[in-house]
Amino acid sequence: MKSLDPVFLDRIALTPSHGSTLRALGEHRGEQELFSRQVPEALETLRKVAMVESTESSNRLEGVIAAPDRLRAVVLRDAAPADRSEQEIAGYRDALALIHDSATHMPFSSNVIQQLHAMLYRYQPGSGGRWKATQNDIVERAPDGSITRVRFRPVSPVATPGAMQALMSLWDRASDEQREPLLTVPLSILDFLCIHPFADGNGRTARLLTLLLLYRSGYTVGRYISLERVIEDSRDTYYGALEASSGGWHEGQHDPFPWLEYFWGVLLRAYGEFRERAGRLMTARGSKTALIEAAVNRRVRPFAISEIEDDCPGVSRDMIRHVLRRLRDEGRVEVHGRGRGARWKVLLKGRGPESGM
């Protein structure tokens, strides 16, 4: 709403560096379309991995955690959720699948946003899909739970329905005027987070809306590379950019560039990972080794061989063991325990887009 006001948009002055970034992202979008036509079957592996990572990272950012084996059972095999954390993970899984399957038929509207939020809580009846009824300030807390600082005061509950309707109207206007989506998408997400329309689940809903709006704008890298994981990997920068760009938001005097530059960086990293992984899939020689190494490098916690198997369909357990032994000999991983109880840990990640922004 504030950021999509035509007067505000007209004041945004892009530097030559910003222009180069937007051109690079446009080129990446075209390159992805080429890969999608050439190796659609191989990219199915990336899609499954991204589903698990997106569900895990977006929920973990909000403190919702499940054991890795249960996470994959819930996300990939539709296992029935066994507790509250798994209920929230299953809800995110369902909302994510809906966007992957039906984004072109899902307009950016209050109804769709409330539908996605309701899906997040569909396994906890009665808690999703409604605008907030109480003020939900974004605060910092001391270790004892006391509030030390109000970082941002979102729109009041009574003003929230009107603020959301204004956001939808300005989005429609910007789309009709064919404004640059690499501006309007991140700015819409910034405004959504500043409105903070729900009592809970705003961060997860914002990440789902990011995927939806990017899909509708032709940037579909989130189907194959988890944007949520990239955000989790840079969570301090994520929160810092949001705080920097939300100052003065209520008056329409905020600086959009910390958030815009962070958002573009996430997309650049995602496209870099996609190029590397899809390129390896197109090369038969070494492709399985590359898939295994990529799956290992994504691990931030100790893992079992079965977890790598889930991430690399069609790759034998013997092949995975062979690669892990080589990585161990190279000093890049270590193993604790033996047999089924063995857990591997990454010590030194390989080079490439996965090892940093």
Image: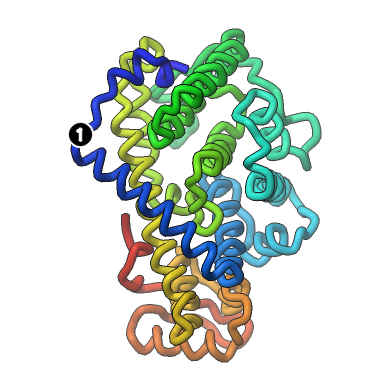
Please name whichever residue, 229 or 278, is drawn nearer the observer in this view of the structure: 278
Q: Is residue 83 above or below residue 206?
A: below
Q: Is residue 143 above or below residue 178?
A: below
Relative to 285, 208 lies left or right: right
Q: Position of residue 38 (x, y in %)?
A: 52, 69
Residue 146 appears anywhere in the view? no
Q: Residue at x 45, y 22 (%)?
A: 177
Residue 153 appears anywhere in the view? yes
Q: Position of residue 252 (x, y in %)?
A: 36, 13
Q: Position of residue 311 (x, y in %)?
A: 58, 71
**Residue 314: which quarter of the image?**
bottom right
Q: Position of residue 127 (x, y in %)?
A: 74, 30
Disc 1 is placed on an element classified as loop
Q: Residue at x 55, y 45 (%)?
A: 63
Q: Is residue 209 above or below residue 34?
A: above
Q: How is the image coloured?
A: rainbow
Q: Is residue 121 above or below residue 196?
A: below
Q: Amino acid at mark 1?
A: Thr
Relative to 352, 184 lies left or right: right
* Dot 1 alpha-carbon crowd within 10 angstroms: few under 14, some 14 to 19, many 20 or more: few
**Residue 346: which quarter of the image?**
bottom left
Q: Which residue is mark 1?
A: 15
Q: Residue at x 63, y 83 (%)?
A: 340
Relative to 101, 166 lies left or right: left
Q: Which residue is farthest left? A: 16
Q: How many marks?
A: 1
Q: Residue at x 55, y 17 (%)?
A: 169
Q: Quadrant of the C terminus?
A: bottom left
Please name whichever residue, 347 or 294, is drawn nearer the observer in this view of the structure: 294
